[in-house]
Structures are given as C-alpha cells and as structure tokens.
Amino acid sequence: MKQIAPSAATSSKSGWTSDLAAGFLVSLIALPLSLGIAVASGYPAASGLIAAIVGGVVTSLAGGARLTIKGPAAGLIVIVLGAVTELADPGDPMSGVYRTAAAIVVAGVIQILLGVFRCGVLAEMMPGSVIHGMLAAIGIIVMGKQIHVLLGVTPSGKTPMALISEIGNSLKALNPVITLIGVTSLAVMIICARYPLGFLKRVPAVLIVLVLAICFDALFDITQLHTYVFHGAEYPLGPDFLVKLPHSLSESVFFPDWSRLISFHSLKYIAFFAIVGSIESLLTVSAVNGMDPERRRANPDRDLIALGIGNVISGLLGGLPMISEIVRSKANVDAGASTSRANLTHGLLLLAYLGVFSPILARVPLSALAGVLVYVGFRLAAPREFIHAWNTGREQFVFFLITCVLTVTEDLLIGVAAGLGCAVGYVVLRGTKLHHILSGSQVVEREDDTLRIRLQGNAVFSNFVAFRRIIEEAGPEVSKVQIDFSQCTLVEHTFRDKLGRLQAELAGVTIFVSGLDAHVCSGADPTATAIRR
C-alpha cells in the first residue's frame, strides 16, 4: 500500500498548532521565573518580564535559533546583582540598576560583533568542568541569598559568604507565615519534579506555585500592613513581602544611565554579560540541536547576533540581560515546537500578562518566588554535580572545585580565570604542544563515503573546534567517520563529551571510535579523561 504524505497545508496547520501550544506552556513557566529572577537580581520585577518579552518577540524576528527560548536566567543573577551593587551610589540602589542597563546594551553590541565575526565556536573551547563549576557556584550563591527571602528576613551581610554564614540567624528570626509560603513553594517544585503523577505531568510546577502564592496572599491578607502573633511573638505582614509591579506598561520602562560606562566596574560587567551570557547561550543552542527531532543544526553565529540585538533592546527598555535558557528551551521541544513561532508566541503572551494581569501578579509573595529560586539554585549545585565532576576525572574535579570555591569566596572573574588557567596548565604539562592547543594534530584520509581521522598528540577541550571543522567541511557525501585515538597520549573529558554530542547533531553521519583500548580512564564516567598507559 502506498503511503500518502500529508498535504503542505495540513502540515503547516499542525506546525502552527503545536507552536502555539508550546509557546503558551513556556509562557506559563517563564512568568514566575522572570519575576523571581528580576527581584533576585536587584531589579524591578517587571524588568524580568520585559527581558522575556523582548527575548520572545525580537530574537524570533531577528533569526534566533528555532527551538531555543530566550529570556532572563538564574545563571546571570549573580552577575546582574553584582553590577547593580557595585555601580550604585550609596543609599540609591536604583542608580546601579540604571547604570547596569547601560552595560547590558554595550554587551549586546559586543555579542552582535561576536556573531558577525563568527566567534560562536569560542564557547566550544571552554572546559566543561570550569563551566559546571561556575554554574554550581552560582547555584550556591543564589540559594545563599534566596533562603533569607524565603524566611522573610533581611540579612545584614552583602557578600555570598556573609549571606551563607547568616542563614542560622535567619532561621532563628524567621517570619512563620512568610516561611510557610516559601517552604510550600519549594515543596511543590520538589514534588512535581520527583513525582510527576496525573495532572502534575501537564501543569508546570511554577504555575501551581503562582496560584498557591496568590491564595496565600488572600488567606493572610498580606496586601494590608498589619502584624500577627504566633507563639507569643509578633510578626509583620504587608506589601513589602509582595512583588512590586507598576500599574501600566509605560511605568515598567526606564532608560540607561551612561555616566559610569567608562569605569572599571562597568567594563568588568560588560565583559561578564557578553562572555558568560554568550557561553551559556551557545551551550544551550548546542544542547537543543541534539534534542531537535528533525536534526536541524542552528547557526551559532546567527543566534549570537539575534541574542545581541535582543540584549540591546532589553537594556534600552530597562530589561534584564537574556540568554538562550535551557529549561524553557527543553520544555519548548518537549511540547512539540517546530519553529521560532513558539518563542514568538511565548513573548507575546507575556506582554499580554504584563498588560492585563499586573494587579494579580502584584499579589504574589516574594517568598514564593524565593522557593522556586532556591530549587533552581539547588539544581545547579546539587550533590550529583560534584559526583559527576569526580567521575569525569580527578583533574576535572580539581578544576570544577577551584572554579566553584573561588567564585563563591572571591569573585566570578577570579574563579573562572583560575579554573581555566589550571585546565590549560594541565594539558600543557601532559604534553600538549603549544601550537597544537587550538589546532590539534590530525592525519585525515578520505575514501568514498568514509572519512578517517587519526588523532595524534593530545585531544583536548581547546582543539575540539578544529577537529569538528574537519568533519563539517568533508561534505554531505560522507556518511561514516572513523576516529582513531591510538596515537593520542591524552583524550580529555570535554573532548570526549563533545564528541558524543556531535553524533547527535550530525544527520546521516555515523561516528566510529577506536584506539582507546590502551588508555586508562581517570574516572568512572564514560567520558572521563583517558590517558595512554
């Protein structure tokens, strides 16, 4: 029986339907997260929605990756909050917000230039252990700050270590009602993740948190300033414990202050926004490439340009910096999205929410959003992340730990620089020649539809891009790639990990690996660093 393909009109209609449905689902996830990320970043709550709206509407029209969702992310909270704090005048935190907006705009311009000059591959050169160490540190810092908000206590400390050390004091001084709301929100996030039964499979956990939070506000009348007595002690409730949103869209917008743009602190955070934001986005784009059912590979440079345009506009309107966010992007793919219309739909719906539902959203307790962010922070810094780093190689665990500890105790720049320096030093000490750090050493042979690559010296994180380019430039006639590692002294974890991801991205190409029998892995993970005996 001959199979009849669906008509173009039917496929198009089905695509539109799935994109609209996916966009609606993602907008429900993005709504509370955008509010919470903005507040945790020291920005007005509406700024998170502005970034998500711009990320949905502008980057879709500018040609961003088809299936990724752009918007504010927990991974940038620490950077934004640091910029707001360091750029503010004493006693005037909003001055730091206005100056941070200027840094976001310039960082967006840099991202556009990175895309124009085809620098999208640079993120592929970062060792995975350093990136994961940075994200784990961000998770720890986010939890250290948001636990106080969850408990309804204002700590005196400002640095990450000071905030972490004050958690015990905040537990003693917690506000029972506010803590109940925060703990309930955290419990909902955990339960929905661990036991997705029945309707929990179809309803985003953050939406349940949002509904419960508004119910708590009605139950305890938090919108009205008053006190209550619990076990003989008196505690306050009032609007200070709720999200603050403007009454109109026009009141949500503010413009950058350029007065401190040429200063050390501004330049430092411009670099952070441009580099860290680009790396996180490009990693998400790469991950989503592997999730795409149609095996389409997004152009990283084009996506960087779209991301930069979005950040320029977001900064000019008073929005947070944005990236391609992995959790929302995965939800988008899982919901059946097929084009960038889903991201566009998500942005337009968030615009409608901000314009229509602001009075309702203003009744959301901050502790409910803190519960969500504590969960997000824990996911970034979960024990399994440390175990995974250990299993990928003892040296990888050292890079991970150095990056994580120094980022928490000192500074993000110091942590990442130290981790990267250690990773480069390790591969050099292991015999990687300086002129092979970026290019590697390969012997390439071509026979019909088969490409044979014999790697020599060391295969490490920094020369994977040059290796991948050989495969990509081989042409569509190649359907088999044989990779021989027998002459490699060292096959580093990040190289092996990216090689596995590459297989998922290449449509119609099968990769065969040989020559690792004489190597010893430095960890239990299948992608652990392999060292020749």
Image (cartoon, rainbow, N blue to C red):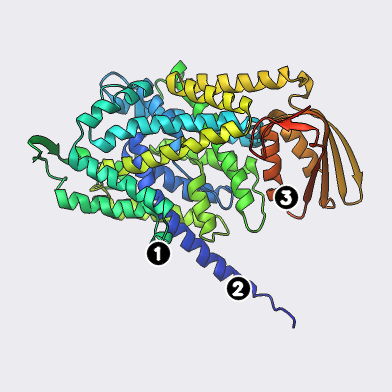
Q: Amino acid at mark 2?
A: Ala
Residue indicated by mark 3: 506
Q: Quadrant of the N terminus?
A: bottom right
The location of residue 204, given as percent across then percent down, is: 40, 55
- The secondary element bearing badge 2 is classed as helix
Q: Is 527 displayed left or right of 518 in the figure? A: left
- How far apart are the alpha carbons under marks 2 and 3? 29 Å
Q: Position of residue 425 (x, y in %)?
A: 67, 18
Q: Is residue 294 left or right of residue 37?
A: right
Q: Which residue corresponds to mark 1?
A: 198
Asked which secondary structure carries label 3, the reply is loop
Dividing the picture into quadrants, the one containing residue 398 is top right
Disc on the earlier residue, 2 or 1: 2
Residues packed near mark 2 inside 10 Å, few (<14), some (14 to 19) or many (20 plus): few
What amino acid is found at the position of numbered circle 1 in the picture?
Answer: Gly
Q: Residue furthest bottom?
A: 1
Q: Disc 2 or 3, which lies upstream in sequence?
A: 2
* Residue that mark 2 sits on: 9
Marks 2 and 3: which is nearer the front?
3
Vertical position of residue 227 compared to residue 16: above or below: above
Q: CA distance from mark 2 to mark 1?
A: 34 Å
Q: Which one is in front in this view, the residue at disc 2 or the one at disc 1?
A: 1
> Dot 3: few (<14), some (14–19), or many (≥20) neighbours within 10 Å?
some
Q: Nearer the viewer, residue 227 or 363?
A: 227
Label 1's element?
A: helix
Residue type for callout 3: Leu
Residue 380 numbered tag: none
Q: Viewer-proximal residue, 166 or 236?
A: 166
Residue drawn at (64%, 40%), measured in percent from left and top? 301
Viewer-proximal residue among 314 and 157: 157
